[in-house]
Image: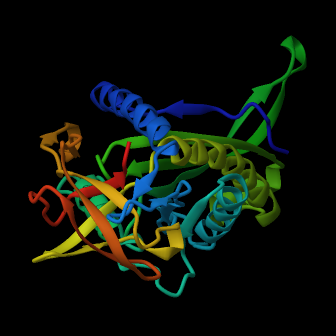
């Protein structure tokens, strides 16, 4: 059986918590203003753009436990994808199994300390037109015995604990919008515990129930983070008056839309080798001239200080 009161511990450094809180405040302001924006073509014809879809990358789930059965990550991955696709609206997911699933989401880049290299990861995400990236790991599957009950009537019970870590990165800043650990407790019988100790085997049905519960809780938090994170596109090339952006029809862009351009922003150093990018300043505007499936072309509309790596969003 699975106990519903799952133990969840949020793992955040104080430094990153302050950064994340400040960033979310900026997102709320930016998101509210972008919803009511209207874009105009150069011939003064008004083009109304609905809120574009958010593009979210889901990295392959990693199982860093000692279990020989490596199918557990596939089980959790399947439930996690099902949960977010059901709960998140107006979202385009790039997920394992897709024909064009990128290599950088198979093996996430890591820094010298062994942590996820958030700077490199989010840079690759921006080049792929992603707004957020979801990373999950199965941290542990452990068994133990303990006495439970009332006073003199306590009996010895056997349990399996499953621990999962989930992180959601904003690709514009590198900030973690979600950084949590979840655990589920499964009560098993004495024979199952002995089998676990000898061969590290756990009943598949019990594991399924645990991962389903974790994915449901995780999915809600992921979708909350995606919702408050406003859409941004990213400039991948500037050649004369020809500007390429890593977003297109799949997220709802159309020719004639005018987007504001913001500089890349200063990079600051965080703890554990993490790097974060501060919000940039507005430097101009571009007009979309041709829109393809996952990219689009634009020309200068105002300003001339527009470079590769800058971000775009709708006019406020």
- Who is closer to the viewer here, 264 or 116? 264
On the question of residue 238 being in view, the answer is yes
Figure label count: 0
- Give the x, y percent position of residue 121: 30, 61
- Give the x, y percent position of residue 212: 74, 55
Q: Residue furthest bottom?
A: 99
In the image: residue 214, left or right of residue 294: right
- Who is closer to the viewer here, 270 or 183? 270
In the image: residue 158, left or right of residue 303: right
Indicate the quadrant containing the C terminus: top left, top right, bottom left or bottom right. top left
In the image: residue 94, left or right of residue 296: right
Identity of the residue drawn at 10% across and 77% down: 240
- Quarter of the figure with residue 297: bottom left
Identity of the residue drawn at 47% across and 66% down: 59
- Give the x, y percent position of residue 163: 58, 47
Q: Residue furthest top?
A: 151
- Who is closer to the viewer here, 247 or 164? 247
């Amino acid at each position: 059986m699975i106990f519903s009161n799952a133990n969840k511990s949020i793992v955040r450094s104080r430094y990153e918590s302050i950064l994340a809180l400040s960033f979310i405040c900026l997102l709320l302001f930016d998101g509210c203003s972008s919803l009511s924006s209207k874009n105009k073509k150069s011939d003064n014809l008004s083009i109304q753009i609905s809120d574009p879809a958010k593009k979210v990358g889901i990295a392959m789930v990693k199982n860093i436990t000692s279990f020989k059965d490596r199918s557990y990550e596939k089980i959790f991955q399947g439930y996690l994808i099902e949960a977010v696709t059901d709960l998140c609206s107006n979202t385009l997911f790039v997920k394992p199994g897709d024909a064009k699933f990128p290599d950088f989401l198979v093996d996430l880049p890591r820094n010298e300390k062994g942590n996820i290299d958030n700077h490199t990861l989010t840079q690759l995400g921006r080049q792929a037109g992603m707004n957020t990236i979801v990373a999950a790991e199965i941290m542990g599957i452990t068994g133990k015995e303990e006495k439970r009950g009332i006073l003199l009537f306590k009996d010895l019970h056997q349990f399996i604990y499953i621990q999962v870590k989930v992180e959601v990165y904003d690709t514009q800043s590198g900030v973690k919008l979600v950084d949590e650990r979840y655990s589920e407790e499964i009560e098993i019988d004495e024979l199952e515990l002995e089998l676990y100790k000898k061969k590290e085997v756990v009943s598949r049905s019990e594991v399924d129930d645990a991962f389903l519960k974790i994915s449901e809780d995780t999915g809600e938090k992921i979708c909350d983070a995606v919702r408050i994170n406003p859409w941004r596109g990213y400039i991948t090339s500037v050649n004369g008056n020809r500007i390429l952006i890593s977003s297109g029809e799949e997220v709802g862009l159309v020719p004639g839309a005018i987007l504001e351009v913001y500089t890349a922003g200063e990079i600051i150093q965080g703890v554990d080798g993490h790097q974060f990018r501060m919000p940039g300043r507005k430097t101009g505007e571009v007009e979309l001239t041709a829109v393809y499936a996952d990219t689009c072309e634009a020309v200068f509309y105002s300003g001339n200080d527009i470079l590769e790596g800058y971000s775009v969003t709708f006019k406020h």
